[in-house]
Amino acid sequence: MTPARLAAVSRLAAVACLLSLQPLWPQTDSVAAIQKRLTLGDLNGAIASCDRVLKASPQNYQVWTLKGLAYQMQGRNAEALALLRKALALQPKFAPALQAAGQIEYQAGDPECRRTLERLLAVQPGLAAAHAMLAALAFERKDCAGTIAHSAKAMNEILANPLARDQYAVCLFRLKRYDAAETLFHKQLASREDDDTRLNLGLAQFESKKYSEAVATLKPLSTRTVPDSGALSLLAEAYEANGQTPEALQTLRQAIDIYPGEEGHYVDLAAICLERNAFQVAIEVLRAGEKNIPKSAKIQVMKGVLQARAGKMEEAEAAFQRAEALDPKTPYGRVGLAATLLQFNAADEAIALMREQHQKDPADPRAASLLAQAILQKGNGPGELKEAETLLTGIIRLAPEDARAHGLLGKVYFLQQHFTKAVPELETAIRLDPSDRTATYQLMTAYQRLGRTKEIPRLQRRVRELLEEERSQESEGGRYRLAIRENEPAKE
């Protein structure tokens, strides 16, 4: 923000403070005279009057506040804030000083701002400007619940500010209130055509499973001179979800032509082919991806999955070995291949691969754990449960601190209705991995079956916390991200 712009904003904020909390000012002659000078724009005269009063009454917090407002109107915010803090040291609950200080701190990104605004609301609970600023601060902390709570108490201010409106809509989306987010994005798009808003609207519709509406919203983005890569990817997925596979394929081919260096488009196109058992077409797509992005581990992983689904396990393993060589931080190999196969619900292929690995190395807990997981994914009959139990008890003997093994064994006992045996395994899994939501939920249910009701409220709270954490992670690390406005009005 330019100095001239900052000065103009400071002046408007100071005048707003002076007028909005007028009834809170004591109506003494000296205060009234200074206020009049300020409203008339006689800032130097107001400062001189303040100095005369303060010389005789240095504890007059009202006049310290007025002098701070005069400095704020001049754009001398650092000096103004020092004066306002002096006033608050004399009277910590003086709302005009709190509001003016909060506005300056907000513009400056001062860490004291949140505390100042909360003190202001303790004195003036319904002050919309304070709620609006706290909503923005909550958004910066990724506290969407706080953003929505404060926005609800300052809705006129929120809807009047493009940035605040975007943040409110984004938080509605992040908390999975997709219909409400869609409504707001729709209103924004109706008032002004904007590609970011159109993308956000399409994403909200997609997450609401309104696939035909998402297609209609996103399709215009594909006709831009240089369409956005993420918009094309989302449009393709919307087409596919809406049963328009040819259009999805065409959109992904368009994306590859425009962005040949982005691996996600090749993987997406290959995945559609995989779902339709068009293995050869998928392989050709991935070969083109290899040529354009020779160091892509994800393309090699997808090749491995395709080869495995086609029954070519040696080729699949070779592809995963290449992926591991390209990305040493990720343990692809056989175990990685099996884990990826499970993500594609290819339990039979994962079982075959891990049975062979387990026979080669019975002491490898990763292979045994994945084999048990694949068996449980395939079915929960007595035979599957017994085999999984045997595998998991063997892992725990070798690696008693394996949280995943304890959690899966607890699941086996839970499915067998052996709740007294399930509880200690699930408790151990949660102790070793407090983020295991499945184990936490199953433990809560096991407690219910055993009549241990006192422990249930704590686990219910924990399940809610883990769900909220997952939602936050999804919104931050998800495949598609909302476009968030980052223009200058952010701090007004």
Image (spheres, grey):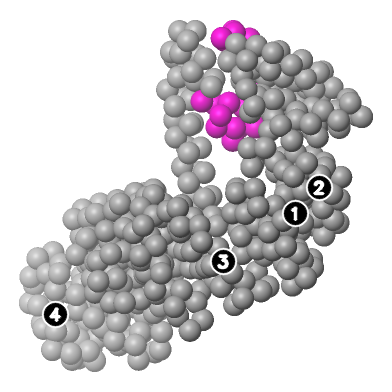
The residue depicted at 60 percent of the width and 48 percent of the height is 275
- Indicate whether residue 75 is drawn in magenta: no
Q: Earlier in the sequence, mark 4 or mark 1?
A: 4
Q: Amino acid at mark 2?
A: Ala
Q: Secondary structure at mark 3?
A: helix
Q: Does the image show residue 184?
A: yes
The reply to whether callout 2 and callout 1 are in contact (CB within 8 Å) is yes
Q: Secondary structure at mark 1?
A: helix
Which one is in front, 238 or 121? Answer: 238
Q: Earlier in the sequence, mark 3 or mark 2?
A: 3
Q: Earlier in the sequence, mark 3 or mark 1?
A: 3
Q: Secondary structure at mark 4?
A: helix
The reply to whether callout 3 and callout 1 are in contact (CB within 8 Å) is no
Which one is in front, 481 or 167? Answer: 481
Q: Residues within 10 Å of mark 1 (few under 14, many from 20)?
A: many
Distance CA(mark 4)–CA(mark 2):
79 Å
For residue 316, the mark is: 2
Q: Which residues are magenta?
A: 417-441
Residue bearing the label numbered 4: 35
Q: Is residue 222 left or right of residue 287?
A: left
